[in-house]
Image: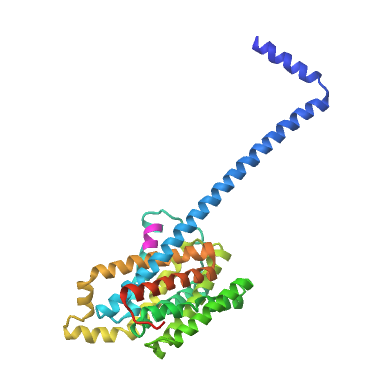
Amino acid sequence: APLIARTADDDALSRTSPSIRGSAVSNGDSNAAASATHQSKGELSLMKVRYAIEVVLITAVYMTVGPALILVNKRIMSDYGFPYPIAISALGQLSSYLFCVLCFRVLRTHTRVMSEHVTWPFYVANMGVVGAASAGSIALGQGAYLYMSVAYIQMLKSLGPVVTSCCLVGFGVERPSRALLGCVLMISAGAALASYGELHFSAYGTSMMLMSTCCEALRLVLTQKLVVNLKFPALEGLYYYSPITAAWMLLASLALELPAMVSTHRTGSELAPAAIVAAHWVDFALAAVLGVLVNTSSMLMVKYTGAVALKLLATARNAALVLFAVLVVGEPTTL
């Protein structure tokens, strides 16, 4: 009986006019298209929510771990008597590379999708320059803490967006808007006023910080070119450039810091580098972990927000660190 009914329906449909049959088919197609459009809009909304959550989480990590690493390194160098900023900086880069090796080679949670494109000429021209700029930025920036206060250094770091914007325009990577340039100029004016009123001004430390800012701007511009323009995954970029950054730092540490380490070690005092590391190994381990988080979150922030936006967020983060240094640590500042 059902078969007879379906046959009768088919015969009735075949006897209808072509216009009616076409209208039925078109109505079915429009309903399917509307359903597909509704589904695509739902998926797009879900992707936007997921993207927003990722940006918020990455920003929260970036805004937190950077100041924490600064305070830990400051305590290691000043309070514990370990005046070797390049060696401490190399520790964070080596830890980042070991973390990437763990992800890509041991646990295999990530896959290197750009390995075919990373030839030796590409590596030297891109990763080599990024590694050198990163080494200069971190080493010079850490060395400035030996001569100046945490609060004043954070004020000087506010010049970062200015230098970064100039590098972006110079390399043709991005052209900031007028509103963004206006914000950058206001920030630079504030940094100039902060320098004028600094109680413990050091020309040597200020020069180191300014050179560190230039190296950092170059690193961010080249990193944005890799992870955004060349579609390089953030963690894979860190996998390639962290070892060469560590190599640059180790070479600089061997040339500039090793003689002082050896002479201090021969005295057998409590200020020997090995004795300090053994006595405060928890702080050194914490510096290594925070170094991994800083490098990873910085790469992701460049990918999600861009180099100039990253430096603007860093400026806000530095302002919070200035307040912490003045209100909690008790560093002297002018009003």
* Quarter of the picture holding the C terminus: bottom left
In the rendered image, residue 258 lying in the magenta stretch gets the answer no
Q: Horizontal placement of 153 versus 274: left or right?
A: right
Q: Residue furthest front?
A: 335
In-front residue for pair 156/16: 156
**Residue at the location (47% across, 79% down)?**
213
Q: Position of residue 4 (x, y in %)?
A: 69, 11
**Residue at the location (83% across, 27% down)?**
19
Q: Is residue 214 above or below residue 309?
A: below
In-front residue for pair 259/300: 300
Q: Inspect this view and state whether residue 60 appears.
A: yes
Q: Is residue 280 above or below residue 269?
A: above
Q: Position of residue 37 (x, y in %)?
A: 65, 41
Quarter of the image holding residue 283?
A: bottom left
Q: Horizontal placement of 35 versus 100: left or right?
A: right
**Residue at the location (77% across, 20% down)?**
13
Q: Residue furthest left?
A: 268
Q: Inspect this view and state whether residue 175 appears.
A: no
Q: How many marks?
A: 0
Magenta span covers which residues? 99-103
**Residue at the location (34% across, 82% down)?**
332
The main secondary structure of the magenta stretch is helix
Q: Horizontal placement of 232 versus 179: left or right?
A: left
Q: Position of residue 5 (x, y in %)?
A: 69, 12
